[in-house]
Image: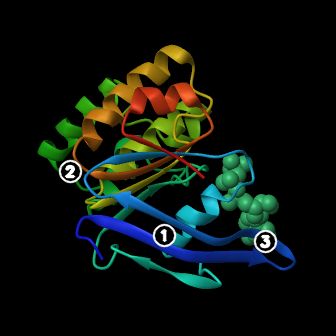
Amino acid sequence: MEQGQIRISHLSKSYGDHTVFEDFSAVFQKGQTTCMMAPSGAGKTTLLRILAGLEKADSGQIEGLEGLRISMVFQEDRLCENLSASANIRLVRGKKPWGRDKKLEAKISKAMAAVGLGGCEDQPVREFSGGMRQRTALLRALYSEWDVLFLDEPFKGLDEETKELVIEYTKKQCFGKTVIFVTHDRSEAGKMGGRLFKM
Ligand SMILES: Nc1ncnc2c1ncn2[C@@H]1O[C@H](COP(=O)(O)OP(=O)(O)OP(=O)(O)O)[C@@H](O)[C@H]1O
């Protein structure tokens, strides 16, 4: 296998009688963003879950992810309701939610301000709107220590102005890194840049 690639070979996955994909092969370059586009139900989330090791394929092979640290933004935010936004993000750095780390907190505040969440650091996420939660989940994924990042429609439902801000920030954080970004939205794909892959 060539260095610097994630290689998917002859992957098949069914749920009962329903075949999600069969004999699917693809190559993703490391150190780049790949925007993966496909219609709803094509199996994008299933593929990301298999790549992340959360689900097993029925057959096929995945090479190039061995030993790499994976981070992921799910379609659901999966936040800890009673923790503040900042504590949710700190958790993935192995920090206790109630502990204080001034340097990290300053970094988190800066990141939150960059995505339009300035001043909300200490607010419990149960008080957040859907869009605020979504951005917190995105920052949490970006702030974990990762080699490969999977983004499953992370900008869906954000208003256009916020989306611009968040894509700009995400793009900066992902520059030169291995990212697989799933979206239906051609304009989001265009704004994130990178290679377009149609599933
Ligand atoms: N746990 C499951 N059990 C049974 N069927 C499933 C399961 N997960 C996914 N599916 C089915 O597999 C197909 C692919 O689902 P998946 O969520 O991967 O698609 P997707 O391309 O990500 O769709 P969307 O863009 O709408 O999120 C769908 O038909 C879905 O109903």
From the viewer's perspective, is 158 left or right of 170?
Answer: right
Rounded to the nearest whole Å, what is the CA distance between mark 2 and mark 1?
34 Å
Task: Name the residue type under label 2.
Answer: Arg
C-alpha distance separating marks 3 and 1? 18 Å
Q: Earlier in the sequence, mark 2 or mark 1?
A: 1
Circle 3/circle 1 CB separation < 8 Å: no
Amino acid type, label 1? Leu
**Callout 1: 10 Å neighbours few (<14), some, many (20+)?**
some
* First in sequence: mark 3 vs mark 1: 3
Q: Which mark is residue 100?
A: 2
Residue 161, given in percent of the width and then of the height, sits at 48, 14
Amino acid marked by disc 3 = Thr
- Return the residue at label 1: 51
Spatial CA span between label 3 and label 2: 48 Å
Circle 2 sits in a helix, a strand or a loop, which is it?
loop
State the residue in front, 162 or 113: 162
Residue positioned most to the right: 17
Res 19 label = 3
Specify the label residue 65 is tagged with.
none
Measured as percent of width and height from the top left, residue 112 is found at 33, 31
Q: Secondary structure at mark 1?
A: helix
Judge depth for marks 3 and 1 and give the one in front. 3
The residue tagged with tag 3: helix, strand or loop? Answer: strand
